[in-house]
Image (cartoon, coloured by chain):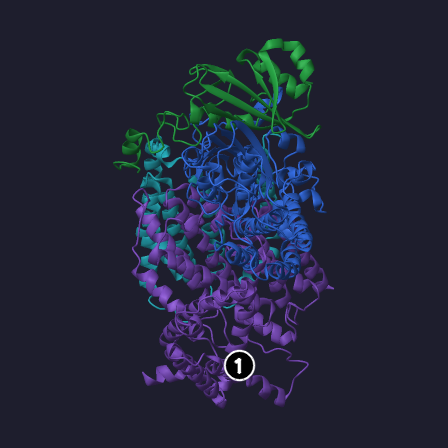
Chain colours: A cyan, B blue, C purple, D green
Amino acid sequence: MAPVATTFFFYFLSALALAGGVFVITRRNPVHSALALIVTLLALAGIYLMLYAPFVAGVQIILYAGGIMVLFLFVIMLVDVGRAEKERQFNRQWVVAIISATGLGVLFVKVFANSKIMAQLMNKPLPTLAESNNTQIVGQGLYGNYMLAFEVASLLLLVAIIGAVVMAKKKI
Amino acid sequence: MSDATKYISHLELGERDETFLDSNELIINMGPQHPATHGVLRVILKLDGEKVLGTECVIGYLHRGVEKIAENRTYAMFNPYVDRMDYVAAVSNGLGYCEAVEKLLNVEAPPRAKYIRVILAELNRIASHQLWLGTHALDIGAMTPLFYTFRDREEILKIFEKYCGARLTTHAFRIGGCQYETYEGFERDVIKFVDFVTPKIDEYEELLTTNRIWVERTKDVGLISGKDCIALGVTGPVLRASGVKWDIRKAQPYAVYSEMDFEIPVGQNGDTYDRYLVRMAEMRQSLRIIRQAVGKIPEGPIMAKVPKVLKPPVGEIYHSIEAPKGELGYFIVSDGSTQPYRVRVRPPSFVNLQALDLMVRGALVADVIAVIGTLDIVLGEVDR
Amino acid sequence: MLDYITSYLHSDLTPGQAGNMLWATVYILIVFAGISLAVVAMNWLERKALAHMQVRLGPMRVGPHGLLQPIADAVKLLIKEDIIPSEADKLVFWIAPLMVVTAAFTTYIVVPFGPTHAITDMNIGILFMLGVSSLGVLGIVMAGWASNSHYPLIGGLRSSAQMVSYEVAMGLAVVSAVLMTSMNATGIGTLSMIGIVNAQKDQGIWFAFKYFPLGFIALAVFGVAMVAETNRAPFDLPEAESELTAGFHTEYSGLRWSLFMLGEYAAMIAVSSVAVTLWLGGWLRPFPNWLSGQPWDLIFSLFPAATFLVLAAIAALGVLRMPKHAYFRVQTIGLAGFAGVLGLIGLVLLIPPVRDRVEDIYWFVIKVAAFMYLYIWYRATFPRYRFDQLMKVGWKVLLPVALGALIATAVVGVL
Amino acid sequence: MVAKLKGQYGSGLEALSYLGQNYLVADRSLIPEILQILRDEEQFDYCVDVTAVHYPERPKQFEVFWILYSFERNERIRVKTGISDGESLPSSVGLWPTANWLEREVFDMFGIKFDGHPDLKRILLPDGWKGYPLRKDYGIIQQDNEWVQINLGIESGQ
């Protein structure tokens, strides 16, 4: 399908993601923060769709927005929000944060301003991504070339699950 | 008793543990307006997640001072008031009160009246159990049995209506016998009802007894041992489901139960499922009693010779009967005047409700509903 | 412009794939209206069917046999006072029902009512469907939290735990169906909803019967999990009325509450559509192999018209059986009108071009309707599960069974 | 049984029967022991009811009853004692846990205190209510107007 109003959707989704991100860190009510995070995640899923990566978009929705955020909310709802709002926020490292954020920003601007690097990046022919068999390509990649990495990652997750069980259970 | 604290339901509603992440202890107020508390029962639940740590019942929302009213009415005038206590088993209430006053007066109702009393009381027991079954199943989430039981209960209420003009608060009996002779075709109607309802009880059982979810929801829920039942004074089907074979109809027969041939169904485990089975079996036994009573009903007067103005001699009497919910007792003190000096009602629901805390401690919220249902309380009787 | 409109009519793609915005919008409107109508009809049917299972009549007063009851209900809900508790989190309270409805309706983008009768066909169709429908739980959790009251909070917690648990079993069951799509010459499967139905067509077997009983087991697991996902009896714990009064929507009233109901029923239809698409051949007619050939094709294509004509006949019978009394005159006329409309639809469906276009949709709808009937049937039959039992069923029964079916399918497929 | 008890306690205890129902009349001081013996030695393991009667004209204003039943002997017995206003009684919750609510109700209705009761507070009437309704000097339409006005916001509940 031919894309429609690509520029508009790109800026719209980006703005949504940015606004969501800002709200996540500025809201004092943790539930509001979590909801803002959901907006960010959904906007990112939209951007993935624009990048002809529907599989990643789908996984983003089903795992992050539908799964992990539900668990986040689950935990947050059990916490006394009134107390949490009065709690001291975790922003004691704001100096370091500002320095690193500025550094990253400067780097981005530099790269963008440097016409040589940009030209090199832009002139590369974009690989044609077929939307119609994206899932199949991802599947072949994961279970073909990157089999080992995939299995290592799943092992890591298994370890994490066992660790969580051990930590949650007082006696086994 | 050393382990007396086991039976005491007293919530420590003190300060909550105020740590940041560990504050999932929840105090929930269930009722007095709640779909599953069968009226205006209020239960304060202390929860850890969904687990019940303790309960406390707050009752009295329907308190009408029945006992105080009795002291200001004559014996005959108080008779209709007792119907308003356990309003789903009004006949049993009336039966207990009339027999107690008769005892105090030293008169005895004629046999025909006694047979009519037994028939109506057993019909009422079936009606009460049907109402219990419907609402209990509805609490657990099965809607359909409610409509089945209400359809069949209607037939009983029709018989009541034909007999005495009222469906619910019947005021069917008078001190000394019955006021009304049976209407034309009463026996036929009752037998027709017995034939009609016998297969219907199988139908209820078909819906529930082997239903896996029903069994899972009720088996091992609200366990109470026979010993605990006796300690807490729990009577009726709850006691029998815990394996204690005790029924006042057999132990200390009143009316004409001594002439009836029936069995006392007992359970073994004392869980909600057993209580369900016991009540189902009790309905069948009641049908058996009704069939016998209709067959044996003698001719004769329906009213004993009682004076126009009732003046029982000075004295006190305790008389109890097996109401659908358990032991319903009347303790009446007479000072020789036309009005009772003191009437104490020993309500089965009130005493049985005490067992709630023991039965639900450590269970889940959903079990509280099931246990309130299985105790078969009527708030009109709890609060009086 | 005219060309733009008519060009699509000759293509055999969905409007989304063809990139035809106009027709996509038309399809969206049709699907939205159709689902809303289906929800309204479902409301009436559920009450009637449930009532008849419970030896009562159900709605009888508003219109003949209560046919206008849903409309009366809708009007009542719209004009009801909209209450927001003063201590509630207003923004979240406001968004929650919208979230539920949006999630439920968005899934219909990929539901294939026929080979070309879908808004669009995505490469990740089934994944999209599961993902978006799982967003509905966010709305429920938000509603439970925003009400700032204990019962809704417990309802919200229950529903989040329940949905997350059952999504696992549901996902595994879906994967085993997706695995079956790759059992062809190329060995490449598909996640696209239309692709899955086409795979069943090409392989000549509905996946419910493929590798019997493996496909059927997966369908059964999905069938249980989908009831739990949509919070319906016997898994209606988040809104268990006897325990939590009304669960997460205790504090909601009027329009917002009706949005929850709309979302719930739409979600029920959506997951039923998934089950039909994945295992019961979607829009394919029954017995394509056994009863094949031109005459059978014709007979099966007459089914939609026949259904409407039979319904019209039943309604006409109802007209005859109406009491002959002045009081019932309006109702009798109304029922006769209804019978007339049904009969007219039936006659229109006999016209060959209409007949051929509608047949796919008809079979799809019939299969979904069977699932919807199951929902009603469950509700009349089963008591409610307790929370720990619910979790036990989800994790200890459904999950291993689904996993086993998946592995067995893979093994059998490779062999 | 009666003879044995009588031998033990003598004049403080009377065993009577009215209309075929047996009852013991005991002194206030003997109550804890007698109840203990009835439960432990005579197998009266089921406390049917605890209640009271008010006689305002007597010096010992209240008569308190324990109605007991023995499953073993299939027999009922009543124990009664008289106490004056303000006097308290030993709680029998330790003997029969069922007495918990029953004693609370007696307290609620008559104002009789039970020593050693774990949670003696009003049960049927609201916690802040004043007056004990089943006393004879409490009129039938009397009510705690103050409580009604404060808690229900109406002039009167009548």
Vertical comparison of C337 with A35: above or below: below
Q: Chain of mark 1?
A: C
Residue furthest out toward the right: C415
At horizontal 54% and vertical 23% (from top left) the residue drawn is: D65
Amino acid at dot 1? Thr
Where residue B85 appears, as percent x and y from the top left, is: 48, 41
Could you tell me how many numbered marks the image carries? 1
Determine the image quadrant of residue A124: bottom left
Foreground residue, C273 or B290?
B290
Residue at the disc numbered 1: C307
Foreground residue, B10 or A35?
B10
Q: Is there any visible trace of residue A149 in the rendered image?
A: no
Which quarter of the image is occupied by the C terminus of chain C? bottom right
Vertical comparison of D150 with D42: above or below: below
Q: Is there any visible trace of residue C150 in the rendered image?
A: yes
Foreground residue, B367 or B237?
B237
Lateral position of residue D18 relative to residue B267, left or right: left
Where residue C82 appears, as percent x and y from the top left, is: 30, 54
Where residue D8 appears, as percent x and y from the top left, is: 66, 10
Foreground residue, D17 or D50?
D17
